[in-house]
Amino acid sequence: MALEAETKRIVSLFELSDDWLNKAVREYHSQADEGLRSEGTSLSQIPTYVTALPNGKEKGVYLAVDLGGTNFRVCSVRLNGDSTFKLTYNKVAVPKELMTAEKAEHLFGFLAKQIEIFMHEHHKDEFESIRSQTNKDEEIFHLGFTFSYPVKQLAINKGTLIRWTKGFDIPDAIGKDVCVLLQTELDKLHLPVRVAALVNDTVGTLLARSYTAGEGGHTLLGAIFGTGTNGAYIEKLSNIKKPIEGEYDDSTGEMIINTEWGSFDNQLNILPSTTWDSEIDKETVNPGYHVFEKRVSGMFLGEIVRRAVLDMTKNDQLSLFKDANSSSNDWHSTTDIGPAVWSAEAVGPGQRRHELEGTLDIYSSSLEDAQAFKAIAGAVGRRAARLAAVPIAAIVLQSGRLSDANSSIIDIGVDGSLAEYYPSFREMIYEALAAVDGIGPEGAKRIRLGIAKDGSGVGAALIALVAARMEKNRSVANAAKRKLDQVPGGFLDSFTNPQQLALGVTVLGALTAVGLWWARRRNFV
Ligand code: GLC
């Protein structure tokens, strides 16, 4: 009985009422607005310089790399131009010691090496033929760099690291341009690869989802629920009140914003805090930051459950894992229960006890033990899903699409292990969305959380494509400008001989190309 009562008490600490959800959505709106107005706010609301979405017609082969929380992926993406793509990739775990390396070059050197290995394995012929070209600039591989940490973006291919998250801690890299860090290491290996675009994984997910959704897809938001959590959405340029440095195309009137919602409510105005949340935060590399992420994402959920269960096993009044038949189940054995938390949710009691044995060395646990464990794991997972609904609801409401008759479905691309594998994670988000004023059950039915598998790789390839075109067109524009400068006197009066006429034609050709450039930038093709 004591176990049941204590389990209920702990479960209740993780419950979030519908009223709380509504209050949290209002708080998100206010912090999001603040982030669009000024720098240094809790929600960073980072302008990404990406001002249009793909329509599925894009074509070509591009490289993309993705430094996530746990793995480094190198991919090449063949965009077929019909909303389909072929992705080839290698994935390696980032060695633990490199996550906290002394020098940035140690980590980035490792990344460059993986790119070299990938090129040898999958693109040897192209690689060798490019190496033998004299005009290497023409034949270089363009690479989209998905770097999923808070970065102050300064251009499509330029961004300085604000801080590390998800267990990385290399102070030497803070404030440096991560594209330059990678390019330097690629150059040391003489690889014919140019880092053409820097992109957050959420931005990649949004773009990839738009590409596969094709024309009329109108994806609003790309979200990650994996090792970390974050979202990127399309915002009207007129709503971004803080200055956006550097060049960008404003013709669409919109820009993708990387919210960095992992840092929503760092000041803890409304976020729930159990003792375990506070303890965990203190032990991370970024205490006081990304506190929303520490309650929602895969890196932390198992740890919250572990600490809650551990405290229960230390309580002499409770029978948890202390039955006569499970005398070896003292709290020392309850060490790393992340995977068990997930499977505790997914399986029935018999299988669950089997999992407790297999993963945690807890033998002969009683049915009550397994039930208590499931209840705590379920409560932590459910709180995460209800928290996850807060930024989604706020962004959907702010977009105005629910009252737009042309937007019958509001499409959201999601990626990450929690979204994909945690049992009922998306269902619990839908349930919470239905409880939000202004959305309700009818509105929730119009919101589609669709898995955008491999989103960040494909999205990075798409941005590399845009960036490569912009770069090429910029050279054409510069060439046109140089030619214009050469035209003597009044432009039209000057075609008095065949040579000048030829020059005029070249200039007009270049100007047409510049015109096309602008047109393409508008249409993103
Ligand atoms: C962390 C990073 C963010 C990333 C997210 C998901 O929150 O700060 O940039 O998008 O993890 O990977």
Image (cartoon, rainbow, N blue to C red):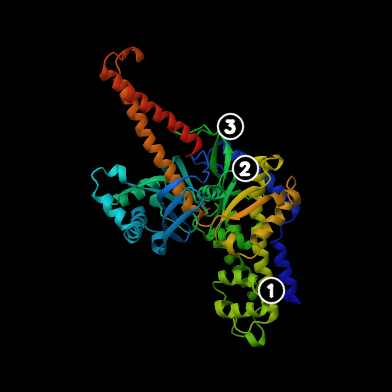
Q: Is residue 136 left or right of residue 24?
A: left
Instruction: Identify the residue at horizontal 49%, vertical 54% (top origin).
Output: 165
Label 3: few (<14), some or many (≥20) within 10 Å?
few
Q: Please give the label number shown on residue 372.
A: 1
Secondary-structure class at tag 2: helix
Residue at left 74%, top 76%? Answer: 2
Q: CA distance from mark 3 to mark 1?
A: 51 Å
Q: Earlier in the sequence, mark 3 or mark 1?
A: 3
In the image, is 127 to the left or to the right of 30?
A: left
Residue hosting label 3: 238
Indicate which label's residue lies in the foreground, 3 or 1: 3
Percent x, y of residue 385: 65, 58
Distance of label 2 from label 1 (alpha carbons): 37 Å
- Mark 1 within 8 Å of ligand 1, using the beta carbon: no
Q: Earlier in the sequence, mark 3 or mark 2?
A: 2
Image position, residue 390 (x, y; %): 66, 50
Going from N to C along the chain, the mark reached first, 2 or 1, is 2
Numbered-mark total: 3
Q: Closer to the camera, 327 or 233?
A: 233
The front one of 404 and 43 is: 404
Label disc, if present, on residue 31 of the rendered structure: 2
> Disc 1 on helix, strand or loop?
helix
Residue at x 62%, y 39% (from the top left corner): 33
Of the residues shown, which amino acid type is indicated by label 3?
Ser
